[in-house]
Amino acid sequence: MVFVLFVIVGIPIFVLSLPLLLILYPIQYLQRRRFEKKYSDFLSEINGKNFFCYNNRRNSKKYIEEEILPNLTDGIEIVYLNGKKVESNYNVEFISQALYKLKNYGRFPHLMKIRNGKLIDKSINNPFYNMLNRNTSKNEFLTKINRFFELTEIKNRAQE
């Protein structure tokens, strides 16, 4: 009985909405392609940039802001996720898209670099929490960050 009712009501609704779908789908497709082109151009414009991404998680935010961020080298940009709101010095819509497209997401903090117009990412959640919980070397953690970004210096060697 329910199936018959579904067919009797569903088929006419589908048939009536088909013209609308045929009109809206190409429009949405073109908008998405236009955005992807702008996003690709954005990645090309910021080629070579490095990003340290972290969020407002209570047990890490203060430590990151007081102990990690001041010791990052100057070539590393900061992206902060305050809940679902992205805070960055770059176009938030494109940075949000980059975060959405993370391939190696394993929770924050996270590293992103742009090379040859492509996004390369790495989660440093495990090394960070190993350092935080086991009280291991901050310099070792900063060195891992710099290795990912292919940077050689450690700014103001952190006190261990």
Image (cartoon, rainbow, N blue to C red):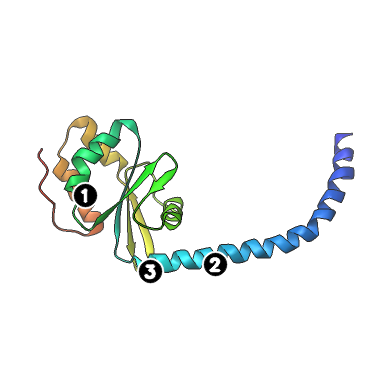
Q: Quadrant of the C terminus?
A: top left
Name the residue at 77% across, 58% down: 20
Q: Is residue 59 left or right of residue 142?
A: right
Image coordinates of residue 52 in percent, x first then y, are 29, 50
Looking at the rendered structure, the secondary structure element under dot 1 is helix
Mark seen at residue 31: none
Name the residue at 44% across, 66% down: 40
Please tell me whether residue 21 is drawn above or below residue 64 in the rendered image: below
Q: For residue 158, which quarter of the picture?
A: top left
Comes first in the chain, label 3 or label 2: 2
Report the residue marked by disc 2. 34
CA–CA distance in space, label 1 to label 3: 25 Å
Looking at the rendered structure, the secondary structure element under dot 2 is helix
Please, what is the three-letter code of the amino acid marked with disc 3?
Ser
For mark 1, does the 10 Å Cα neighbourhood hold few (<14), some (14 to 19), or many (20 or more) residues? some
Please tell me whether residue 45 is drawn above or below residue 135 in the rendered image: below
Q: Is residue 16 left or right of residue 152?
A: right
Report the residue marked by disc 1. 144
CA–CA distance in space, label 3 to label 2: 15 Å
Image coordinates of residue 34 in percent, x first then y, are 54, 67
Report the residue marked by disc 3. 44
Please, what is the three-letter code of the amino acid marked with disc 2?
Arg
